Structure formats: C-alpha cells, structure tokens
C-alpha cells in the first residue's frame, strides 16, 4: 500500500496538512483533529490537469461477472478474514490504536462457534487486527446477552477526551454499542483481544439504532427508545457527556416535533386528531422515528439527523449549541423546566435550522455533510481563477426489501446545503439492476451506508456506497453536479454465505447464497474494508487505476514538464 500512502502524503503536503499513521488516534502534535476526534475538516482542493477538469465523459463501466463470481473494477483485494461467519450490520469502525489497526465489525445477531473460546456464542462485535492487511487476525467476539446482535458502534481514543490525563484515560480506548434493542453499553478495548464492560448507560429498551461520539468533547448521541419514557413513534435521541467513560452524565433527550412525550399531551391529542403544519414535520402523522445522527463538532456547530430509514424520510439540520444548551432557561427563556426528558414542541424547534422532507418512498438512513466542495466548472470563469465552493450533504435511503418491485429504486442523493436554511438535491449517482441482474440475484439491491470516518485524500472526491448485493460502488464526486462511477467490488459467496431470495422481472423468485455488502469503511492508510451482512467475512481492498487517479495529488511544479 506504499503507493496509497505516498499519494496521501503528497495530497496533504499540498493542502498543508500532515497525515500520519496515528491520524486521529494518538493525539500527536501534528494530528489535524478531523471529526469525530477533533473539530476540523480537510480543505478540499481540485486536482490539476485533465483529472480535475469539468465536463469529463463518464468512464465505461464494465459489466460484473455472474452472481456467484467476484467482480472488481479499479479495486484490488488485499486481505480477507472470515469473521467467524458472523453477519455484519449497519456500522463498522477502524481504529489506529498506537499503531495497531483494529477493525470493529458489528453484527445483526444470531450465534456461532468461536474457535478462540471453543464455545457457541451470540454474535456481537468482532474485533479484528488489520495491522498487516494481507493477514488480518480475528481477536475477539464481544458477545451479546441476546441473539439480536450489536448492530451499531462508536469508538474513541482516551487521549482526545477533555481532562484525559486527570481522569486516567491516556492511551486507553473505549467503545459504545447496544446489545440488541435492550441497552447502550460502554466497553474498554485498550486490549482489543480482551474487551471489558465498564457500564451500561441505558437499559430497559424497546428499540435502538445509530450513535455518534465526539471524541474531543466526549458528547455522545445515542438513538434509543426506552420503555415508559413517554416518547411517541419509536426511536429518539439520548445525549450524554461521556468525556469520562467511567462516569456518564445525562444531558437531554431530543426528537422530531410531534415525538415529544406526555408532558405536552394536550397538543399531542390535538395534533393527531386534527393535524396541522404546526404539529409535526414531514408527511406522516405521527412523525417517523430517528434513524441516524452525525455531529460536525464545535467548529461547524451543526448536527445532522436523519429520520426514517427507508420511507417517510426527513433530513434535519440543528444548531449544536442550542441542542445541548436549549434546556437551560438562561439560554432559552421559552424552554420548559423539564425539557431534558419531557420537552414541549417549542423546545424541539429551538435548535432547528431547517429540514427537508424526502419523497415518502425514500428514507433518511444517512445524512452526512461535506464542506467546501470546489465546483470545477467555475475554476476558470473568474479573474482570481479560484473555483466557487459549496457545502453538500449525502443522503441515503435504505433498501429494506429483497425484491425490487415493492420498493422504489434506492440511490444516493447529493444535496446543496450552502444555504442551510434551504437544503436541496442537486444530483443522484445511480447503479442500475442491469448488467448484473441484481433484482434476481438474492438479498437486497439498493443503497445502505457510506463511510463516516474522514481522511483527506478521499474527502469531497470519492463517495463509497454499499449497495447490498451490488457490493461497494465508488463514485467520483469532484463535480457534485455530475457524479460518475469509477470503481466497484462485488464479493463472491463462500462457505459461510447465507441464503436469501430475490425477484426477477418475470416474477420468478430465486433463492441463492448472495453476498450482501453492508459498509465500506476506511483507514488512514488508504485501505477500504468491505463488511458483509450474509456472513461472508471482511475483505480489505485498495483502489487502483482511474479510481486512484481521482485522489492523486497535483504534480510538483519542479517535476512538471
């Protein structure tokens, strides 16, 4: 992977940002502190030469091989671990823990034999050492109490927390995850082969989903639905200060207007019987539950929330300071005294900047911003020669049906959020069912997730999207108005791949051992980690060919001819 690391160093030299092997994990002096470890985002620059020019014709995308064959285009397999045949899930994380690259792969559940312990264990969180990418080593299965898995995770290195030295957190690592729908837990993973449960933050759950953890502040946002909490329509957000993971501190709960609990029962009853636009947002009543959250940290002071996974989606932008302090009546005179647990509609509207209602057939599974994207068409149209820059966000709707017919075609949406009061879609990268016959392949066909970690060579240039049975699909988004495909990886089934079914256009149902890509996560060396929900393991990849050129740095003036 020396070529990728050289490219990363070259790119960041031009951007005057140092990229080290300990990026975001070791708190070195040259650590740029990208979220979630710090408050910063990379500066995006256009590549020089034809690779960065506007109006490039799209690349010719080669057809994939048969459904039971591995297909790669501008990507190369580097390593593989079977993950004990445990199915992956919505999340994954890759940590540089003092030079050891530890993969945290979540699971949808079930159970299986663990050769490390000689026992049959519930699937929870798999920890895999990928320090040597061609030979990843399975370290531990952090089993769950239930057989519902631990589908979501967030990890922080203790060095980044405020008061880390005073609290004894230096050179320690911590994971938050939920056990099925039951709880949210904090584990110490400093020794990744022997994780230790520290405490259970939330319990008595009905449902749960994503989390986001700001490592530099310790603020954690966990999606949960607790029995008897009084909130309507499922999941909402619990916010905690976990800057000292051994001593969690509750801050508040939050959700979409219309989700608020019985403290505002009169308004709730009136809204549900005679709804109006002052009662709830979106097109459903009661409103859809919370699915995803992403904080842009203290510098951007924004939080991005997606409501609804596959339908009735709402994308919401919040003022982070107001979200965290809006329950303090000295900050917001209109705040109710108990808005931390029983907010009024006014309390929920206080931090809201804007929201965008999706087509009812689309959800807001993922809502992640990308700041300062230069528009290549503008780079030569002004006296300064500097391109116009916009802020964009990527919205993903999850495909939840194995058959194509019951659900609308799911593809990413790129939105212009430069004026955050009025987010608006500008383009849709697409992958069709042909060639590939993905609707008949088995498993789901459509979008799911994208990486959450930030590494400068990729940021604002490549979008890596898991398309379930169509594998990982990679898009060039340097011109966000005209994105195009530049790479893909579609895994072949193996002995651990589970059987699932799909529908062809002839209404014939096919059941096959189809792979099912959940996520393609990144590390700071340039590797991409494909995690498979059908139990087909962890595949480590790198970019090649035209995909690698997208993130290549401009040529040095001294070497230019």
Image (cartoon, rainbow, N blue to C red):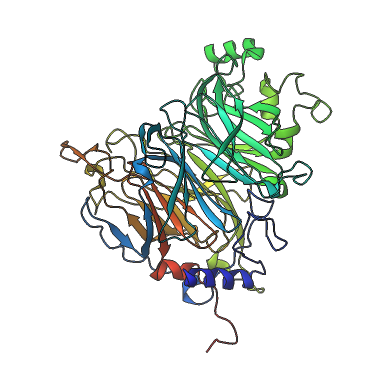
Residue 489 spot, x, y in % from top left:
34, 56
Q: From this viewpoint, is residue 288 visible?
A: no
Residue 86 spot, x, y in % from top left:
37, 40
**Residue at 26% in and 47% down:** 438
* Residue sticking out furthest to the right: 330
Image-quadrant location for residue 21: bottom right
Q: Describe residue 361's horizontal placement relative to residue 25 as left or right.
A: left
Q: Is residue 394 above or below residue 118?
A: below
Q: From this viewpoint, is residue 250 visible?
A: yes
Q: Describe residue 241's horizontal placement relative to residue 362 as left or right.
A: right
* Residue sticking out furthest to the front: 118
* Residue sticking out furthest to the bottom: 561
Image-quadrant location for residue 187: top right
Residue 460 spot, x, y in % from top left:
54, 59
**Residue at 20% in and 54% down:** 66
Residue 90 spot, x, y in % from top left:
45, 40
Image-quadrant location for residue 443: top left
Number of numbered discs: 0
**Residue at 53% in and 43% down:** 367
């Amino acid at each position: 992977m020396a070529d990728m690391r050289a490219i990363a160093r070259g790119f960041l030299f031009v951007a005057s940002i140092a990229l080290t092997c300990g990026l975001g994990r070791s708190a070195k002096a040259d650590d740029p502190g990208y979220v979630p470890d710090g408050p910063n985002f990379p500066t995006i620059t256009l590549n020089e030469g034809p690779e960065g020019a506007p109006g490039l014709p799209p690349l010719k995308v080669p057809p994939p091989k048969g459904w039971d064959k591995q297909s790669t285009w501008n990507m190369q397999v580097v390593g593989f671990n079977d993950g004990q045949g445990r199915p992956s899930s919505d999340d994954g994380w890759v940590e540089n823990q003092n030079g050891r690259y530890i993969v945290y792969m979540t699971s949808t559940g079930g159970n299986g034999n663990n050769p490390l312990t000689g026992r049959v264990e519930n699937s929870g969180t798999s920890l895999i050492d990928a320090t040597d990418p061609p030979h990843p080593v399975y370290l531990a299965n952090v089993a769950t109490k239930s057989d519902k898995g631990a589908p979501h995770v967030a990890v922080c290195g203790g060095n980044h927390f405020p008061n880390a030295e005073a609290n004894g957190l230096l050179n320690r690592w911590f994971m938050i995850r939920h056990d099925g729908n039951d709880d949210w837990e904090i584990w110490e993973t400093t020794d990744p082969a022997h994780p230790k449960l520290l405490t259970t933050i939330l319990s008595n759950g009905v449902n749960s989903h994503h989390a986001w953890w700001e490592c530099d502040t310790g603020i954690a946002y966990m999606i949960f639905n607790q029995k008897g909490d009084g909130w309507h329509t499922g999941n909402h957000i619990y916010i905690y200060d976990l800057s000292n993971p051994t001593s969690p501190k509750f801050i508040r709960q939050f959700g979409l207007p219309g989700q608020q609990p019985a403290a505002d029962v009169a308004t709730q009853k009136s809204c549900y019987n005679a709804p109006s636009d002052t009662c709830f947002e979106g097109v459903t009543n009661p409103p859809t539950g919370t699915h995803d959250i992403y904080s842009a940290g203290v510098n951007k002071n924004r939080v991005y929330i997606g409501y609804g996974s596959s339908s009735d989606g709402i994308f919401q932008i919040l003022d982070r300071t107001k979200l965290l302090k809006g329950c303090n009546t000295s900050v917001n005179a209109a705040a109710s005294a108990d808005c931390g647990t029983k907010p009024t509609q006014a309390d929920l509207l206080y931090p809201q900047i804007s929201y965008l209602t999706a087509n009812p057939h689309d959800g807001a599974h993922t809502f992640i911003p990308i700041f300062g994207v230069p528009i290549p068409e503008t780079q030569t149209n002004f006296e300064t020669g500097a391109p116009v820059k916009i802020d964009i966000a990527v919205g993903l709707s999850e495909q939840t049906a194995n058959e194509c017919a019951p659900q609308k075609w799911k593809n990413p949406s790129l939105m212009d959020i430069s004026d955050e009061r009025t987010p608006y879609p500008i383009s849709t990268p697409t992958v069709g069912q042909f060639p590939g016959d993905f609707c008949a392949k088995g498993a789901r066909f459509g979008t799911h997730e994208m990486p959450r970690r930030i590494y400068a060579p990729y940021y604002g240039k490549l979008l890596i999207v898991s398309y379930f049975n169509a594998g990982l699909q990679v898009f060039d988004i340097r011109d966000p108005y005209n994105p195009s495909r530049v790479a893909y990886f579609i895994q072949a089934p193996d002995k651990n791949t589970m059987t699932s079914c799909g529908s062809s256009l002839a209404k014939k149902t096919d059941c096959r051992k189809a792979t099912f890509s959940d996520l393609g996560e990144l590390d700071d060396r340039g590797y991409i980690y494909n995690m498979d929900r059908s139990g087909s393991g962890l595949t480590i990849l790198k970019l090649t060919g035209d995909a690698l050129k997208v993130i290549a740095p401009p040529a040095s003036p001294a070497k230019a001819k």
